[in-house]
Each structure stands twice: as structure tokens, then as C-alpha cells.
Amino acid sequence: MRKNHQVLFESLKIDPYIHIPKYEQLVNQFGELIRQNIIQKGELLPSINSACKEIAVSRDTLIAAYKELQRKGVIESRHGKGFFVKRVPYLNKKKVFLLFDVMNGYKETLYRSIVASLGARYVTDIYFHYYNKNLFKKLVSESYDDYDYYIIMPHFNEDTADIVKKIPLSKLIIIDKDIPSMPNAAAVFQEFESDIQTAMHQGYSLIKKYNFMYMLIDHEFQFIPDGIVQGFKQFCKKYQIPGGFIENIENHNIAKGESFIVFTDRDLADIIKIAHEKKYTLGKDIGIISYDETPLKEVLAGGITVMSTDFMMMGRTVARLIEKRMNTKIQNPFRLIVRKSL
């Protein structure tokens, strides 16, 4: 018997008089021994048979403890060799899997809100799928059973339920874009088609002074939900506003009397730059509405008008669903913030 295994066996004690399952007592004690470096990262744990004999617990109890440690990512199984310590566990902390499409200004706001609202009892690992459904599937499938909660942003204009539904509903929260084919899954979402129409209606008195409104849609670098496109078309039709779509602003000759709805920071910067070169005044000669609020847009070029959901609120609501173990769908608030650019 290895010397440190003997120390381990002497340290593991089951208390039959407390209302904590035996396997959970073992999980907590194993974790503490690893944190104290009595069992080191990369070290082989005792076999099931030898541990059962030394600790005087049933085989099922020990297997349950090892499986829970494996689920938490603390140990790993190597075929034919046994269980090894994978990492030092966090003390009494829940692990959260957070999957975004990409990191940008508003995602940073959302991320910070989620982490701050969850507090110190949670540890959040963040991943990105970059609009690649195969990568999305790989990241989700490889994380099954490794986390206590899964916060998923399914930014695709196609159903991803076949991938996400393998996560237990008690652990899953869908954010920003709902998955309608999963009616029983918790979600904090935007209603894109109606949200954009409501916001543009609020800004109609300013929008109508322009001769034409363009929406810049570059699906390669930014997820644009089909609902936003449909809502824009319906608004233009209802109010008889000439509207159209542009994929690349560099191929468009910006003229006075035009207004633009933009999604990416790059398109926003390009339009501001062109307006400056042509000596156009934002909010007078041309109009800009940017999608998704960030702190920079409040001060950029004297203030950029935005249509945006409240990402701070979204993060707080996600945390509340986790804390309260609520399984419900909540539509996040959406608003138009009028500034100088419109």
C-alpha cells in the first residue's frame, strides 16, 4: 500500500449520525485532502476494492463518490489504470458552463452581470462557438455532466434542441435567443421580431425625417436573428418607409437623407468615419441606430442611438433562476435609447 494512501484511509471517516449521505461525505473529504495537497494533482487514487475494505463502506457508496468527483472534474478515469486527480476542487462552489457565440462589448456586460450576480459561491467557465454549429455541438457534448449549471446562448437561425436537450432541464438556462422547441427549458430571452418593431415605433418621429433606411446585415461576423429582419420589414411596410439591406458598407455610397441600423462595431465605426470625411452631421444629414447597448456607445461621436435589451438585467435574471431553481421562461426588457446620432 502506498504511504499516502495509508494517510488517506486514516483521514476518511464516515459519520453515521449526520444527515449527509455517505458518498457525499467521502466527496467532501476527498476534496479537502486534495486541497491540502495530501493527495496531489496527477496522483492515482486507491482502487475501488482496496478503498472499500480500508474505509469500511459499500462498493456502491465508493463508486458513487468517485463518479461525483469525476462529474465535478476533480478526478478522471484512465482506461485500465484507474482514477487520477485531475485538478484541485473549488471549496463548496458550483461550476457553471457559459457558452457565448463571440465576445464583444455587450457580451462583456452580460458576462460581468452573470458573474457578479451569482457571487463567490459559483465558478464560471466561459466558451465561444463563433457561429460554428459543429463547434457548438462539440463544446456542449464534451461538457455533459461536468458542470452544475449550463448557460447556453444558441445564436443560430436553426433549431439546436437536438444538441441542448441532452442537458438536464434542472441545470439548463437558455439566454438571449429562446429555443421554441424546448418549451420546458428555462430561458431569459429577447422577442426579436416584436422588440424591434416596438423600438422603431418609439423612434418613428425621428426616423421619418430620413428618405431611406438601411439595415446592415453581415451574417459572417454577427448573428442576426431572422426575427429582427422580419420585424424591420414589417415596420417599413406599416409606416411606408423605404427600406433595404446592405451586406458591406464599403460598397455603398452614403448620401444625405439615409439612415442605418448597424450590428457590428466595425460597421458603426466605418459609417462614422465616412460621415466625418464627407462632413455629414449625425442626426441631421444621416442617422444611425446601433443594435445592443455598450458603455462606449453612450459617448462615441456625441452619443449613438441604440436599440437594446437590458443585458445587466438579463445577467441578474439568469442568476435568480439558478439561485431559486426556477424553471421558467422570462422575456427580457427591450428599449430604444435616443441619442445624438438619430
Image: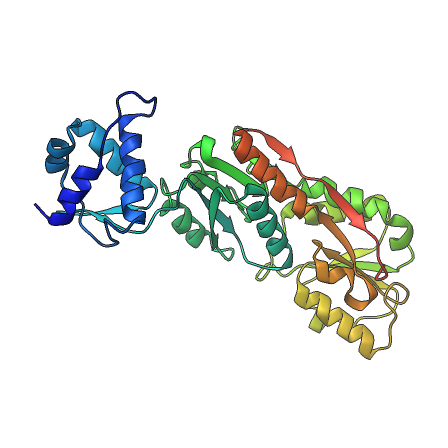
Height in image: 310 above or below 278?
above
**Side (left or right) of 331 relative to 274:** left
- Viewer-proximal residue among 75 and 290: 75
Residue at the far bottom in the pictured view = 277
Q: Give the total of numbered labels.
A: 0
- Viewer-proximal residue among 133 and 116: 116
- The spot of residue 99 in percent (x, y) is 49, 49
Q: Which residue shows up at 67% across the image and 42% down it? A: 313
- The spot of residue 85 in percent (x, y) is 25, 49
- Viewer-proximal residue among 132 and 213: 132
Residue at the far left in the pictured view = 1
Q: Quadrant of the N terminus?
A: top left
Q: Quadrant of residue 7?
A: top left
- The spot of residue 54 in percent (x, y) is 12, 34
Q: Which residue shows up at 79% across the image and 61% down it? A: 304
Height in image: 24 above or below 132?
above
Q: In which quarter of the image is the C terminus?
A: bottom right
Q: Which residue shows up at 66% across the image and 68% down it? A: 266
**Side (left or right) of 53 relative to 94:** left
Q: Which residue shows up at 24% across the image and 38% down it? A: 66
- Viewer-proximal residue among 322 and 338: 322
In this picture the colour scheme is: rainbow
- Residue 149 can be seen in this image: yes
- The spot of residue 119 in percent (x, y) is 54, 43
- Residue 180 can be seen in this image: no
